[in-house]
Amino acid sequence: ASANIALYSRSGGGEAARIIYSNKNDYESISPGWSGDTSRLDISVTSGGNFSEKMDSTSPYSSTFHESIHNISKGNEIAIVITADVFLVGNSSPLLVYDEKKGDRSIRWNSLNVRKFVTHSGRWEKVFFMLKTGKNRSDDHSIVIYFWNQDKSTFYIDNFKVEGVLPEN
């Protein structure tokens, strides 16, 4: 089962943080900003819809999100919030990767070992990854977000979402 996540500020009177950008790949239709191999769509293990993305020994990288920082931040310092439903099989241990680029050059690369947060195999669990863009990010920077199947194991991804959230004032 999927969980909805809302970010709240301690000092903001309990109001939800302001989301200024949201893009979700639920694998049900082609989502703008996402690229990937549609032959990996799977119907055997899904999280609420008809399809998920199956990763296995032939797929080192998942569907990938590409977007300019400016289109997400609209000139603001923001937090990038990445969520996905993940179904691990056996000892699979993929990485969720955030790669910030200036042109073709990577200038910030962060990863989250999914296995450290998804402790049970064989069921859907939510992965949550948040990074701040910083004040000095240039409008010509872009971000690339994907799962890296470094151990070439089997797992499934669904409801892969990227959001831009304004921080507390």
Image: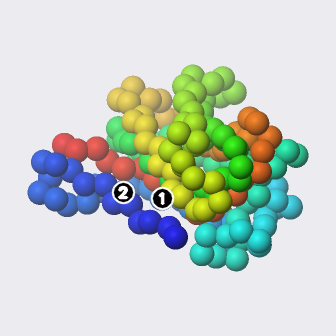
Where does the image place residue 44, in percent across and percent down from the top left?
A: 77, 71
Residue drawn 66% across the image and 40% down it: 93
Q: Amino acid at mark 2?
A: Ile
User: Quadrant of the image for the C terminus?
Assistant: top left
The numbered disc on residue 22 is: 1
In terms of depth relative to the viewer, which is nearer, 126 or 98? Answer: 126
Residue drawn 65% across the image and 60% down it: 122
Q: Amino acid at mark 1?
A: Ser
For the residues labelled 2 and 1, the Cα–Cα distance comes to: 7 Å
Where does the image place residue 48, in percent across and percent down from the top left?
A: 60, 75
The numbered disc on residue 19 is: 2
For label 1, the SS is: strand
| Residue 48 visible to an observer of this rendering | yes
Where does the image place residue 114, in percent across and percent down from the top left?
A: 58, 43
In terms of depth relative to the viewer, which is nearer, 99 or 148? Answer: 148
For label 2, the SS is: strand
In terms of depth relative to the viewer, which is nearer, 149 or 101? Answer: 149
Q: Left or right: where does residue 149 sit relative to residue 18?
A: right
Are the residues at dot 2 and dot 1 in contact (C-beta closer than 8 Å)? yes
Q: Left or right: where does residue 103 sit relative to residue 132?
A: right
Where does the image place residue 5, in percent across and percent down from the top left?
A: 38, 60
Q: Left or right: where does residue 138 sit relative to residue 33?
A: left
